Image: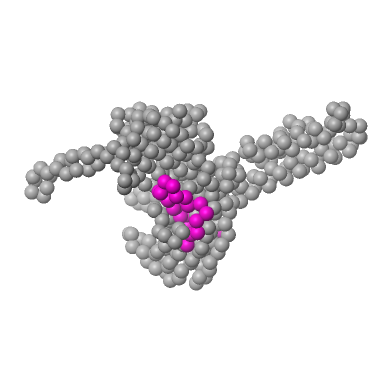
């Protein structure tokens, strides 16, 4: 069997990411070299022996492929996979660059087991997945913890959030399906019905953390988490069901690898100039030259009198990135923070997580909202005329 036929055979059984394909090429190239002696002449052992050796080596190549591909896939929870709309190749990329690591620490209270199972962490953002077993809710009923307390290095965290994964998938046009591909159900008033319980009866809680201190990092920091009391939520009111505390002490692992770019590009006619961008696979950080500006606002008081108040100008909203192949990824920007430092009212800073894994080297422009989207479909496929495109040279 020649090298091309071996690769073709392997590809029938497994979808091979580029990075894994390279590993297979190396293994099979080694086979080819070993078939030729050090002198450059083909060795003179029997064809039967050669074919046997070839198949042993190909089996080794399959083992390499299976180990690499499965190791990356096994580390991903269903919720994290869906949250980041991640491909198999991106999983391998994040794992090999140590942005994501598997975790396995469990706490059981009152028959309910909470297990931390995966983290994805860069310097400023951390996402943690927790599996919850032993608690069940009816379809459409939202589970929640009454309190979730988090400290990093003994102090409060700049921004945090979280919730149970609802198994809802939003496609490129903003339409909802469940992660198994079936159309999402709706209530009589058109509200989408979430599906919090997985097929195996478990549920998943995804936590988001952010550090917006420029010279501080989440990585390597001790973290304490406490989930208190488990129940359901209806009409914004928490209804307790189990009174207990599930506590974890963790050290956040991740990667500080970023692409840092110094630029000097205006954001359209907004008056803001991008001076620096830092891009990781899961977040964006942007600095602007944008001195603090007061903006007067006219209004009317309760007696109908015209009054004037003051607000402050903001830079246009960061909404996504453009890749070198021309692909525009809009609607990928998540929560974060923005504003001025206490002692610097000239440099405006924006920190944002993103829900789409990107290769920083492939980003060639930042996208800002010039005009608001009129529909969900437009938000996730924002036309160029509604964007400020800031190239990163």
Side of 314 where 136 appears, left or right: right
Q: In this orientation, which residue lies closer to the viewer: 309 or 344?
A: 344
Q: Which of the pair 221/245 is nearer the observer? A: 221
Q: Is residue 223 magenta?
A: yes
Q: Is residue 364 left or right of residue 336?
A: right
Q: Nearer the viewer, residue 185 or 126?
A: 126
Q: Nearer the viewer, residue 217 or 208?
A: 217
Q: Which quadrant, please, contains the N terminus?
A: top right
- Name the residue at 47% across, 57% down: 205
269 in magenta: no
Q: Across the whole image, how many numbered discs are drawn on residues? A: 0
Q: Is residue 50 left or right of residue 287?
A: right
- Up the image or down, 122 lies above or below 28; here it is below
Q: How is the image coloured?
A: one colour
User: Could one spot residue 335 in this view of the protein?
Assistant: no
Q: Is residue 39 above or below residue 61?
A: above
Find residue 86 and report its horizontal and vertical position in percent. 53, 43
368 to 76, vertically: above or below: above
Using the rendered image of the protein, determine whether residue 62 is visible from the camera's viewpoint.
yes
Part of the protein shown in magenta: 199-224
Q: Residue at horizontal 38%, vertical 29%?
A: 265
Task: Tell me where residue 310 sits by quadrant.
Answer: top left
Quadrant of the snapshot with the C terminus: top left
Q: Position of residue 389 (x, y in %)?
A: 39, 29
Indicate the position of residue 66 as horizontal and vertical percent values: 68, 45
Query: Hey, which residue is sitting farthest front in the picture?
Result: 343
Q: In the visual, does 360 lie left or right of 348?
A: right
Question: Residue 388: percent from the left, percent from the top?
Answer: 36, 30
Point 54% across, 61% down: residue:
115
Name which residue lies at 31% across and 36% down.
290
């Amino acid at each position: 069997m020649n090298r091309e036929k071996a690769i073709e055979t392997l590809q029938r059984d497994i979808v091979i990411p580029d990075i894994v394909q390279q590993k297979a090429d190396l293994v099979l190239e080694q086979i080819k070299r070993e078939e030729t002696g050090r002198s450059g002449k083909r060795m003179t052992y029997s064809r039967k022996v050669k074919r046997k050796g070839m198949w042993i080596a190909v089996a080794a190549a399959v083992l390499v492929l299976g180990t690499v591909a499965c190791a990356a896939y096994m580390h991903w929870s269903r919720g994290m996979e869906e949250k980041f709309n991640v491909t198999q190749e991106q999983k391998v990329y994040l794992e090999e660059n140590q942005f994501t690591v598997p975790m396995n620490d469990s706490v059981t209270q009152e028959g309910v087991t909470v297990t931390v199972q995966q983290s994805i962490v860069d310097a400023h953002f951390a996402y943690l997945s927790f599996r919850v077993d032993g608690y069940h809710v009816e379809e459409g009923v939202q589970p929640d913890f009454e309190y979730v307390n988090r400290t990093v290095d003994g102090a409060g965290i700049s921004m945090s959030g979280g919730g149970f994964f609802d198994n809802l998938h939003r496609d490129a046009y903003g339409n909802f399906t469940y992660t198994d591909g079936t159309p999402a159900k709706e209530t009589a008033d058109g509200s989408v019905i979430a599906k919090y319980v997985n097929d195996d009866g478990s549920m998943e809680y995804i936590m988001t953390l952010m550090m917006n201190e420029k010279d501080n990092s989440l990585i390597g920091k001790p973290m304490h988490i406490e989930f208190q009391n488990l129940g359901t939520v209806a009409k914004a009111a928490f209804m307790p069901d189990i009174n207990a505390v599930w506590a974890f002490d963790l050290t956040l692992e991740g990667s500080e690898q970023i692409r840092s770019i110094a630029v000097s590009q205006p954001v359209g006619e907004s008056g803001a100039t991008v001076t620096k961008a830092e891009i990781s696979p899961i977040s964006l950080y942007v600095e602007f030259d944008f001195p603090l500006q007061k903006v007067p606002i006219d209004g009317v008081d309760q007696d109908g009198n015209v009054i004037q108040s003051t607000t402050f100008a903001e830079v246009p909203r960061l909404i996504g990135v453009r890749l070198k192949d021309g692909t525009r990824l809009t609607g990928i920007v998540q929560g974060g923070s923005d504003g001025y430092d206490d002692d610097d009212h000239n440099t405006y800073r924006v920190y944002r997580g993103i829900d789409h894994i990107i290769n920083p080297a492939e980003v060639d422009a930042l996208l800002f909202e010039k005009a608001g989207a009129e529909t969900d479909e437009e938000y996730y496929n924002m036309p160029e005329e509604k964007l400020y495109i800031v190239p990163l040279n």
